[in-house]
Image (cartoon, coloured by chain):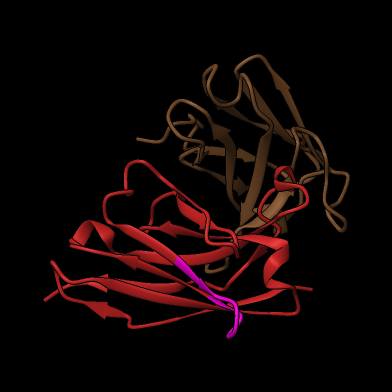
Amino acid sequence: QVQLQESGPGLVKPSETLSLTCTVSGGSISSYYWSWIRQPPGKGLEWIGYIYYSGSTNYNPSLKSRVTISVDTSKNQFSLKLSSVTAADTAVYYCASLPYYDILTGYYYWGQGTLVTVSS
Amino acid sequence: QSVLTQPPSASGTPGQRVTISCSGSSSNIGSNYVYWYQQLPGTAPKLLIYRNNQRPSGVPDRFSGSKSGTSASLAISGLRSEDEADYYCAAWDDSLSPRYVFGGGTKLTVL
């Protein structure tokens, strides 16, 4: 049973960089693609991207120029950095996982989500 | 706007069967599997259907998925009050680099 927990600042100033970390427990860091998905208040879901423990990444083209996802295997954590944020980046940010052995099984494991507000 | 198109709302009475549609294109639903997620208020999404019509362990067989061409549907039979939630379809999209795309979500109300 994989458990995911997001952490990071709940308030970020416009033009600054949003930084979040997801801590993984109950599962091997090498067995999944580790993803970030966000949801603006009252709106739908948006996929941000994923990373494999080897460091290979895949980002949403609409966010690619501002997104970096990284992994720290020694801490069983992966992270999201989103630069030059605006109010449009205000959202609940979820971390989630896709099984490496079968990416087509979908996002079964999710974190509880963390609200990040962009405001001065 | 979302890459996949869903009706914003749906409703039904307890015991009824309701369906939620999801429309896409050849680069997503037309060539890849469809997924459905249920999101109860204030909680993270839950995987309901994967690979068009497969249910993860623990998901009741009242929930079923289907796909035809560039469209898909989620059917819920024997509707219950606890089914009141937001439902999202999703698929991989190959139009640029592979990306995971969602529908805009459908708010299901149990009357």
Query: Which percent across, then down, holds residue B105?
Result: 50, 43
With respect to residue A110, does A26 lie above or below? below
Whether residue A75 appears in magenta in the rendering, the answer is yes
**Shade of chain B as shown in the rendered figure:** brown
Residue A8 horizontal/vertical position (percent): 39, 82
Q: Is residue B89 above or below residue A79?
A: above
Q: Which quadrant holds residue B61?
A: top right
| Count of number-bearing discs | 0
Residue stretch in magenta: A70-77
- Left or right: A108 in relation to A115: right
Residue B88 location in percent, x, y? 57, 44
Residue at point 39%, 51% (across, down): A43
Please name the color used to draw chain A. red
Left or right of residue B2: residue B68? right
Q: Nearer the viewer, residue B85 or A28?
A: A28
Give me the residue at 71% from left, 23% from top. B67
Q: Quadrant of residue B58?
A: bottom right
B76 left or right of A52? Answer: right
Can you give x and y, in whole percent of width and height, for residue A101 in the image?
A: 78, 51
* In-image side of B26 versus A80 (left or right): right
